[in-house]
Image: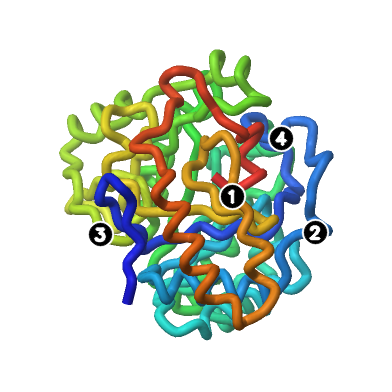
Amino acid sequence: MTTLQDLQGRTFPYLRLSVTDLCNFRCQYCLPDGCKDTSHRTAINLDEIRRIATAFASLGTNKIRISGGEPTLRTDFVDILKTIRDVPGIKTVAVTTNGYKMDQRVESWIDAGMTHLNVSIDSLEPAMFERITGHNRLDEILRGIDIAFAKGLPRVKVNSVLLKGMNDKELDRYLDWIKDKPITVRMIELMETGDADTFFQNHHLSGQIIQKQLLERGWIKSLRLENAGPAHEFCHPDYQGRIGLIMPYSKDFCADCNRLRVNSQGELQLCLFAEHGHSLRHLLQSDDQQELLNQRICELLNLKEDKHFLDQGMTGSTRNLSIIGG
């Protein structure tokens, strides 16, 4: 079996697959005015999703994360889960969601084949959560996590974007929450995007500050698994939960990149902040195109840069993170 490898020798067992650019939250750092111009109606269909998953699995990918926008807004979301679950070679079917109505839906996601869940919770204080996201839905999201555990999901990851002057004093609140819960809270440095440069300047906070606080409290850096995401995780013997830090502005952040992205229009995005994607859609129209599809993916991988250029203020074509799900 061919293994996806770029010119730097990095391999890619992990695909982030966006199935829509539509989102119903109004997060301050992403879509403060709501979702306006989208390509939701022309998103890849179920057969195209199956062909993408099959191609990447045949090239060594074993983990697919379904993202958006907000992927659960698709009416066929459960079918998407089942379709990817049934692709030979795919061992991990992960979902990233804002948690909308999760307390009503998460059981059906698990039944359909979801093995890993990431939920965005940018604050555990209800008023601040509403201020950041534009929604008063924290309680239903927390209920959804409890239901997921009751259903048998062994661990949940929670994403929290670090925002100076907003949620930057909540470390203790998160630590108290995960004391007796198998939750990994991943604190993510705010990344500059084309639509949010001023917000970035006002609210960016380095994850190094949180890392220093964790180390001072006896937290220890964990080993990183092969198909893990970009977070550096920290554990503590007195806590069931973990803290992860995603720091894209840190030195050598891209050195161990292991993930590729396909957006909801069937474009391979070699980096979250690439100038443009590369369309695969013309090779997704029938099953007998798989050999050509595989060949094209391998060819395009030779174009992958060794790093992003965020530190130079170059955000590529990513106007906001809902376009490709982060």
Q: Secondary structure at mark 2?
A: helix
Q: Which residue is found at the position 76% from the left and 48% from the top? A: 24
Gap between marks 4 and 1 measured at Cα: 25 Å
Q: Which residue is found at the position 65% from the left and 70% from the top? A: 284
Gap between marks 4 and 3 measured at Cα: 32 Å
Q: For marks 3 and 2, give the one nearer the viewer.
A: 2
Q: For marks 3 and 1, give the one nearer the viewer.
A: 1
Residue hosting label 3: 225
Residue hosting label 2: 42
Gap between marks 2 and 4 measured at Cα: 21 Å
Identify the disc placed on residue 31: 4
The answer to the question of whether label 4 and label 1 lie on touching residues, with beta carbons closer than 8 A, is no
Q: Earlier in the sequence, mark 1 or mark 2?
A: 2
Q: For marks 4 and 1, give the one nearer the viewer.
A: 1
Q: For marks 2 and 4, give the one nearer the viewer.
A: 2
Q: Which residue is found at the position 83% from the left and 39% from the top? A: 36
**27 on left or right of 2:** right
Residue hosting label 1: 278
The answer to the question of whether label 2 and label 4 lie on touching residues, with beta carbons closer than 8 A, is no
Q: Residues within 10 Å of mark 4 (few under 14, many from 20)?
A: many
